[in-house]
Image: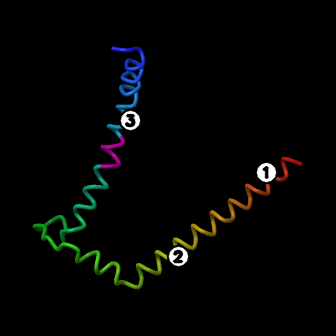
Amino acid sequence: MKYNEKIQKKGFYFVLPTLIIYGIFLIYPMLSAFHYSFYKWNMISESKYVGLKHYIRMFGDRRFWNSYLTTFHFTFISIFIIIIHVIKRKNKSSV
């Protein structure tokens, strides 16, 4: 085994615990939530497969689009203000 391969293998072993924790606490819940979104289930009775029905209803709902646009608007304005602030600070410090 070459020296470079040993270093890469050791680096992988250092990163592996982080990847496992990331997968357990972030990736798995996201995938299971996506899977559950195709079912109608109240956690008491048996689950029933409804397919894309929830998504069709969501994209057809006016409240969804209103909240989506509000979030997009707020994010865009916040980022714009932050960029302007950073540019002003940069120009002030370079003088």
Q: Which residues are magenta?
A: 22-27
Residue 54 in the magenta stretch? The answer is: no
Q: Earlier in the sequence, mark 1 or mark 3?
A: 3
Q: Which quadrant would residue 87 be assigned to in this image? A: bottom right
- Which amino acid lies under the numbered mark 1 shown in the image of this protein? Lys
Residue pointed to by mark 1: 90
x and y, in percent, of residue 37 in the image: 25, 67
Residue at 41%, 85% (x, y): give it. 62
Q: Nearer the viewer, residue 69 or 45?
A: 69
x and y, in percent, of residue 31 in the image: 27, 55
- Which amino acid lies under the numbered mark 3 shown in the image of this protein? Thr
Q: Secondary structure at mark 1?
A: helix
Residue 14: which disc?
none
Assign the magenta stretch its main secondary structure. Answer: helix
Residue at 10%, 67% (x, y): give it. 46
Label 1 neighbour load within 10 Å: few <14, some 14-19, many 20+: few
Residue pointed to by mark 2: 70
Residue pointed to by mark 3: 18
